[in-house]
Image (cartoon, helix red, strand yellow):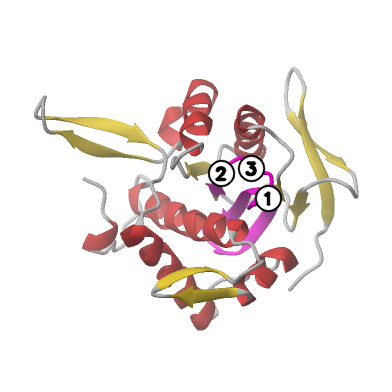
């Protein structure tokens, strides 16, 4: 567990994305831009009581948390704007945004303003047209949820990642298995856990698809 080196928010000027220090900010910085990065984002459902919008930035080489963010304040369109700024701030990071439910609108906004080749997508077969269509965003279902969470658990167990962020670590400690479904304990939240798990998937995907990089990717994680 580490103390953030900076806390604040991002603003966009005519020529750059700048970090502004503010102790009331929702963005916690553990390392400013340097190494290439991947971002995972979990979109809140918009309920008065529930999880926050959350994003975690991971270093591609270090696999450590570079930044973490969670808040319930922005509307989905504002969260899309923030994610664009966050991605640009971290040297055009590769990004995966959960597109379940309200997340669809965040992804739809993001693909209009952020380089599409830096947004995770997969192909889905259209049974009627018998052709594959590109679908941007990460779908969390029963299978993929178990997959990304088990990969994250393995990294923590092996010590191959440094979570650093106190709220993220707290959520991990309050994450339980209820009737076979990994989720937050009653009264707790899991937005940062899921954002970190998605970020881990985005990191592995980016490493596997970067030009000149050879990384083994299990069949269960390949994109067709």
Residue that mark 1 sits on: 49
**Residue 67 rendering spot, x and y as whole percentages:** 69, 54
Going from the N terminus, do you reach mark 1 or mark 2 first? 2
Residue that mark 2 sits on: 43
Going from the N terminus, do you reach mark 3 or mark 2 first? 2
Q: Quadrant of the C terminus?
A: top left
Number of the front mark, 3 or 2: 2
- Relative placement, left or right, of 23 versus 211 is right
- Relative placement, left or right, of 139 versus 64 is left
Residue that mark 3 sits on: 90
Q: Does residue 124 lie above or below 15 as drawn?
A: below
Cα separation between marks 1 and 2? 14 Å
| Residue at position x 55%, y 54% in the image | 195
Number of the front mark, 1 or 3: 1
In the image, 113 versus 168, the foreground residue is 168
Which numbered marker is on residue 132?
A: none
Number of the front mark, 1 or 2: 1
| Residue at position x 38%, y 52% in the image | 205
In the image, 141 versus 19, the foreground residue is 141
Q: Is residue 174 magenta?
A: no
Q: Locate residue 84: give its quadrant.
A: top right
Cα separation between marks 1 and 3? 31 Å
Cα separation between marks 3 and 2? 20 Å
**Residue 53 rendering spot, x and y as whole percentages:** 63, 45
Q: Does residue 24 lie above or below 135 as drawn?
A: below
- Relative placement, left or right, of 85 versus 106 is right
Give the crowd class for mark 2: few <14, some 14-19, many >=20 residues within 10 Å.
many
């Amino acid at each position: 567990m580490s103390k953030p080196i900076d806390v604040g928010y991002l603003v966009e000027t005519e020529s750059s994305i700048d970090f502004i220090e503010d102790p009331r900010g929702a963005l916690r910085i553990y390392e400013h831009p340097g190494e290439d990065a991947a971002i995972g984002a979990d979109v809140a459902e918009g309920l008065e009581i529930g999880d926050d919008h959350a994003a975690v930035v991971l270093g591609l080489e270090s696999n450590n948390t570079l930044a973490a963010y969670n808040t319930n304040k922005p509307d989905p369109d504002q969260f899309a704007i923030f994610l664009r700024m966050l991605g640009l701030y971290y040297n055009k990071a590769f990004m995966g945004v959960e597109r379940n439910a309200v997340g669809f609108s965040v992804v739809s906004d993001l693909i209009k303003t952020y380089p599409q080749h830096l947004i995770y997508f997969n192909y889905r077969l259209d049974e009627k047209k018998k052709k594959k269509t590109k679908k941007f965003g990460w779908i969390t279902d029963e299978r993929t949820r178990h997959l990304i969470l088990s990969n994250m658990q393995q990294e923590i167990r092996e010590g191959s990642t440094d979570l650093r962020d106190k709220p993220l670590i707290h959520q991990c400690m309050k994450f339980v298995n209820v009737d076979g479904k990994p989720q937050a304990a009653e009264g707790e939240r899991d937005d940062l856990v899921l954002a970190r798990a998605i970020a881990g998937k985005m990191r592995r995907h980016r490493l596997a698809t970067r030009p000149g990089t050879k990384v083994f990717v299990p069949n269960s994680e390949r994109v067709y």
